[in-house]
Image (spheres, rainbow, N blue to C red):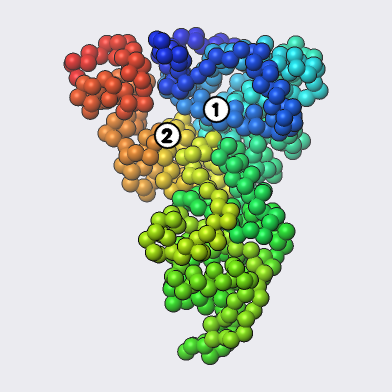
Amino acid sequence: MKMFDASALEPYFQRGPGDGQIRLDGQRMILFYASAFTEYRRGLIDLCGSKAARSLITQVAYAEGIKGAHLIRKLHLADHDDVDNYRLSALIHELAGYAALEFTQLKINVQRGIFEVELTLRDSVEAESHLSAYGPSSDSVCWLLMGYLSGYSSAFMGRMVVFRETRCCASGHGTCRMVGRLADQWNEAERQRALATGPLASHLSLGHGAADIPAGTHEIVGVSSAFHSVLYLVDKVAPTRSTVLLHGETGVGKEVIARLVHRRSNRSTQPFIAVNCAAIPASLIESELFGVERGAYSGATHSRPGRFERAGGGTLFLDEIGTLDFASQGKLLRVLQEGELERIGDQRTRKVDVRVIAATNADLRTEVRGGRFREDLFFRLTTFPIRVPPLRERRADVPLLVDFFFQRFCRTHDKKPSGFTPDAVAVLMEHAYPGNVRQLEHMIERAVILADQDQAIDSFHLYAFEDERKSKLPVNSADEAGDLDVILRGARKKGLGLQALENEALRVALSDAKGNVSQAARSLGLTRRQLAYKLNQAKIRVDAT
């Protein structure tokens, strides 16, 4: 099939004179001898084992594929279809020297949710490296390429795509062969093979599918390195009796992580009780946590156990723990230290066997310094702290999460939009997500409800009911959007061609920067050299702005 000329990447490729740096789209790159790559790969396999090395390589490559798709979106040609634009991905592989790609099947339509891709790889550096280090293999070995294609394609579609290597040079074949499909379109046997050879992911991404899981079910999905760092800590602490403190921004999924710790512990068959400390009035928090005896106060007509007793033998999750008052903090500290409590109005001490997992979106160290949180309780809670990263730090998880929520809400609301428009995919992949995973979940549910049956979800479905100005955050940044971003999206909606849209962006950026090319380049996410090249190509004079 026809390939694009590699000159399309020239404006994004720079080699600084004398500074020893090579950059692609502003990101530093290095040239790596194939022999060194072979030794590096062999050392990783010998140190970690083949299975762990494969998982790590595909996981890292998947994340790099997500980044690569960001560059391809800049090269996106409005007058070309999805198939033509997708073929740009081969330029990255050939530029890096991984392999030469030849597509043998390309059925891609982002709006209709169609992705059926098959390709052959000639001269795969991974196959050569494996043969050099270990000789022939009965399994596929092009893990890096497989992970990159999965990540790149997922970001291109806005939904989880998984590639499998069905033929490999390391197994005696003349060329390597890759097959890519949307995650939910593999059959059961193929899903299991993909799980065994693809990037690390929750079983929900390729198992029975999120469509079979009712809304409200607490589950965690992800493929990013940040996600798996959290899972690593969860696996370490879950079998122990240690108290855990989860800290992170609102909406990152702290309760989901707490439930995961419980499920992977030896308390999994016992109760999991969740308490939002901020939602309970200060006058009632002690009775809710520790229980009350009959006659302890007016209205206490019967004795009842608190959340600690109800969680006996299991796990108690205390969300927003920083909101507890000092008296409750003292009683909580006693329970953690002594394993016993007293109900309000009772003089009898009761033993409790409860594992406590606390969560907060506040900086408890700051609260301690401000005298609002007990220092002794702080140190007791931070025996094993786990930071849950915000979604902007785990963008590789976005396609998987989109696919998970898309399937869930299609089933919940009996709707079936065909897919996502390219504009909607760009929004999903580049949004800053100040509300994190919870915000993404709400965006997808709203879009599924608003979109017409068998029609694609567009960006306005995602932004519905939100403040238009605040919703249009720039790519990979939490800063507020400027006039440029608003104008660009408006121009795109008017149907302007790519070149006209880009030229308008250049003029607006220069105008906003009062002719300062470096400042304009920063606002566009370009280097000064890239912008100068584009201005020259568009015949835009700096002094004319």
Residue 267 in picture, x, y percent from top left: 70, 61
456 and 513: which is toward the camera: 513
For disc 2, the marked residue is 476
Instruction: Give the structural element (helix, strand or loop) at label 1.
Output: helix
For the residue labelled by badge 2, is the local secondary structure a helix, a strand or a loop? Answer: loop
Disc 2 residue type (three-letter): Asn
Against 465, is 93 above or below?
above
Question: Is residue 412 among what the camera can see?
Answer: no
Decide which of 139, 175 is in the foreground and name it: 139
Mark count: 2
Q: Which residue is the site of mark 1?
A: 64
Task: Choose between 498 and 28: the one closer to the eye.
Answer: 28
Residue 86, image x, y percentages: 53, 21
Q: Residue at x 55, y 27 (%)?
A: 65
Query: Which residue sits at x=23%, y=26%?
Result: 513
Q: Position of residue 16 (x, y in %)?
A: 40, 13
What is the crowding at mark 2: few (fewer than 14 residues within 10 Å), some, or many (at least 20)? some
